Amino acid sequence: MEKVRVDSWIWAVRITKTRSAATAACKAGHVRVNGERAKPAQPIGPGDEVRVRQNGFDRIVMVTGIILKRTSASEAAKHFEDKTPPRLSKEEAGFVPMRDRGAGRPSKRERRDLEKLRGY
């Protein structure tokens, strides 16, 4: 079975824009292979699950084929199966109270209202 470096593969299938960004993501711990943190040179092959953390969300892909060079997006899509769950919209995620920037510390009344809202 043929294997390839994980940083090279996530760049070749267009998950990251550059090879150096793929390497940096691996070093920062944003890439997991089969549930474990991956170093840039870790070999992967068909059947492996790769999770890449991007913009606060995990992108989950299953490796279906090995690709060594970066090609077109349609060709690259043949080498992985996307298992990423759909993201929730802001309405579905629920109301998140936010304070205005620079509004300062909450008053005693505002703090009690926040605690009541949070259920403390």
Image: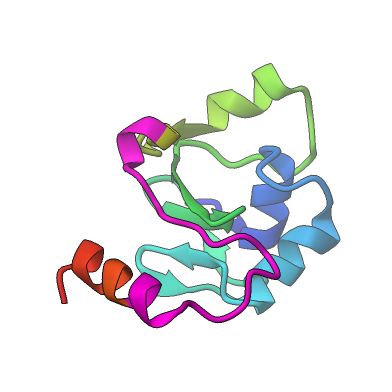
Residue in the picture at 40% in, 52% down: 96
Q: If the image is split into quadrants, where does the C terminus sit?
A: bottom left
Hey, which quadrant is residue 105 in on the image? bottom right
Total numbered labels: 0
Residue in the picture at 25% in, 73% down: 115
Q: Position of residue 54 (x, y in %)?
A: 60, 53
Q: Please give left or right for residue 56 compared with residue 7 in the image.
A: left
Q: Main secondary structure of the magenta part?
A: loop
Q: Foreground residue, 5 or 32?
A: 32
Q: Position of residue 111 (x, y in %)?
A: 36, 77
Residue in the picture at 79% in, 60% down: 21
Residue in the picture at 31% in, 68% down: 114
* Residue 26 versus residue 75 in the image, above or below: below
Q: Position of residue 65 (x, y in %)?
A: 52, 37
Q: Residue furthest left?
A: 119
Hey, which quadrant is residue 67 in on the image? top right
* Residue 12 versus residue 43 in the image, above or below: above
Q: Is residue 45 visible?
A: no
Magenta region, residue range:
91-111
Magenta-colored stretch includes residue 120 = no
Q: Please give left or right for residue 39 compared with residue 11 in the image.
A: left
Q: Is residue 91 visible?
A: yes
Magenta-colored stretch includes residue 108 = yes
* Residue 88 versus residue 47 in the image, above or below: above
Q: Foreground residue, 64 or 114?
A: 114
Q: Position of residue 28 (x, y in %)?
A: 65, 77
Q: Foreground residue, 102 or 17?
A: 102
The scheme the figure's colours follow is rainbow
* Residue 115 versus residue 99 in the image, above or below: below
Q: Please give left or right for residue 29 compared with residue 24 in the image.
A: left
Hey, which quadrant is residue 97 in on the image? bottom left
